[in-house]
Image (cartoon, grey):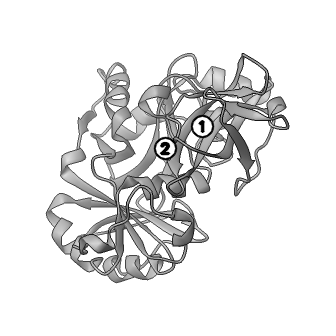
Amino acid sequence: MPAAANTLTQHADFNALANNSVVSQLDGNYGVLSIQGIDSAKFLQGQLTCNVQEVTAQQARRGAHCTHKGRMVASFYLLQISEQHYLFVLPLETLSALQKSLQKYIVFSKAKLSDATNEYILRGISGENAAKKITDIFGAAPTAALAQISHENGTAICIDSHPARFLCIIPSASQTQFDEALSASLTSDAHYWNWLDIASGLGTVRADTIEEFIPQMLNLQVLDGVSFTKGCYTGQEIVARMQYRGILKKAMYRIGGAGVTPIPNTAIFQAENTQAVGHIVCAENSNSTQWQALAVINHDAIEHTLTLENSSDIAVLPLPYSITEK
């Protein structure tokens, strides 16, 4: 493993690392939920916002599982590792909630859910040479967003294509070999990876926001995380109604500020207004004094001065994609 001097801290200047090769060790922050059995695909198709028929050994998907009211219990990456075996990769703090919710519906299906977190290690590979490192280990590197490649060393999913960034799901037995192949890289914990997600506009449900947001509030319809043609799933009626008949008054924006980094579900206010106009989805330090976040905010509040509940002013930053207002 890299020497301690090559390990990034939470308060490193993340803005200055764009051209560096960084290995983010995600264990302890992200987990793996497994589902196996002949009914796995059929069961998941009736429970998730994404189209499970589009999930193959070469293609992963973002998605969410919702309550009947269309509120997200969890959001995740879904990948297939064999014909009847799928894995969810998601924040560890929401894994048990997802497993408990899905377990209510799986009783009559020939499929089994299990927490497989201890069976895999999770690594994020980012930076200028990320694609080369993936090629060195897996023999090739997926080039399109959410494309994946599988190998005896595990699975790699392309999270972003410009610049390239990869999520690796590695069997625990291959950990030493995998980490040794990346030993010349800078290493980080999940903070840098989370910061890259924020820069990419990729929000996720956290423990403090379970059942707080519908999928469109986290822009999942823009990020191929919701299928409006796949048919029924739990919460589908609410999600579809909002897309076709409703007016979505809020969406996820990228923001920044100074001072203490806010936690998920921290309220955002319009200046001189005591009613919250938004809430933090996730946030990370950019350096020792600045932070960036993704937040669900009312569209009509964006042009006004926004503050956190501790009165700290915040700025609206650009997203790398366009938000479609409905």
In the displayed structure, would residue 164 be above or below residue 315? below
Judge left or right: residue 267 versus residue 35.
Answer: right
Q: Which mark is residue 325?
A: none
Residue 99 visible (yes or no): yes
Residue drawn at x 72%, y 23% is: 241
10 Å crowding of disc 1: few (<14), some (14-19), many (20+): some
Task: State which quadrant residue 185 falls in.
Answer: bottom left
Residue 227 visible (yes or no): no
Q: Nearer the N terminus, badge 2 or badge 1?
A: 2
Quadrant including the C terminus: top right
Task: State which quadrant residue 156 falls in.
Answer: bottom left
Total numbered circles: 2
Q: Are marks 2 and 1 in contact (CB under 8 Å)?
A: yes
Q: Is mark 2 on a helix, strand or loop?
A: helix
**How far across and how far down the image is residue 255, in percent?**
67, 45
Residue picked out by circle 1? 230
Q: Looking at this view, is 94 or 232 the one in front?
A: 94
Task: State which quadrant residue 18 falls in.
Answer: bottom right
Residue picked out by circle 2? 52
In the displayed structure, would residue 199 be above or below residue 88? below
Residue drawn at x 62%, y 50% is: 201
